[in-house]
Amino acid sequence: MANSGDSTQEPPARDVPDWGDSPRAVLFADIAGSTKLYEALGDAVAKRLIDESLAALAILTRRHGGRVIKTIGDEIMCVFQGAERGFHAASDMQQKIDSMPIVSGTKRRIRIGFHAGPVIEEGGDVFGDTVNIAARMAGLARGMQIMTSRSTVDALPLALRGRTRTIAAVSVKGKADDMSVCEVLWQDEDDLTMTVAALSVSSINAELSHQLVLRHGADEITLDIGRTGVGMGRDPGSDLVITDPKASRHHAHIEKRRDKFFLADQSTNGTFVTFNGEREVALRREEIMLRGSGQIRFGHSTTEGSGETVDFSVRG
């Protein structure tokens, strides 16, 4: 794993539960405003708070009979047997994080999205349409919110359906029709009320405001709502062509996931990332979440004093 601790993944459980052909509830939860946590509290304190939060979410996942698939940066992905277990786990996760102590005037908040349906399971990971929809639900949530799909709500027992409300219809990549979105009411508070207009405006503004700017020589690429991925390597068809012989043909890829940007190393000689003011991080077939600004190097550490550099800057 990356030596900074920004990307970790739990190994698959040795005794994977046999859930038969029942639908899986895929759940994503991440720390809302994690970038601001780093800015307000400093790297050491912010990372401790995030690590504590993710550890608590992992414990609750197992308590509800689920499995942690992976954690990347400040996000956890897990899977449960059916919509009902996903519902209870999501509610308990919000209550647990909400009860955690305030540190230096800062309160931790998480946003959660989940969706129940069939998945493809392979090598301890899960894939497919259900995963994509669950990620979309998480992207619509704000801090202290749980979002899910209407089809997932319809799969819940009647008593639990009464603890949800329909919010809006949103478009989902790869779907011809809009999908109805619901909020799980894990608290009985009026201030959690969200109108359809508020959801639409906040979601669009959040996606529009987050950008990643990459600079390599005279080339500049911006990842945002209109462009969500970029490939880097020696292959002439790469978005950013790296000519260094130590770079692989398809060396690394950056992907925008909701309002965050993840760099994945796909190379033989590794990718080296330096966040400004911090120590270098070496990636080998791993992912890391980009934040702030810094430099990406291909097959060379900064200590070598050679090789090409891509500068990055996260905005929003």
Image (cartoon, grey):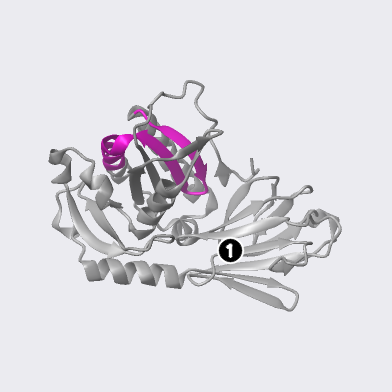
User: What residue is drawn where x is 37% and y is 53%?
Assistant: 138
| Residue 42 visible in the shown view | yes
Write the residue at 27% across / 46% down. Answer: 152
Work out whether residue 104 can be spotted. Answer: no
Looking at the picture, how far across and down is residue 14, in whole percent? 51, 22
Question: x and y percent of residue 130 in the render?
Answer: 40, 47
Q: From the image, tell me which residue sits under label 1.
A: 229
Verify whether residue 68 appears in magenta. Answer: yes
Identify which residue, 107 or 16, lies in the foreground: 16
Residue at 41% across / 42% down in the picture? 53
Q: Nearer the viewer, residue 204 or 59?
A: 204
Q: Residue furthest top?
A: 15
Q: Is 5 positioned to the left or the right of 33 in the image?
A: right
Task: Give how far across and how far down residue 286 sits, in percent.
Answer: 64, 46
Left or right of 44? Residue 108 is: left
> Residue visible at 72% across and 53% down?
271
Looking at the rendering, the stretch of residues picked out in magenta corresponds to 65-92
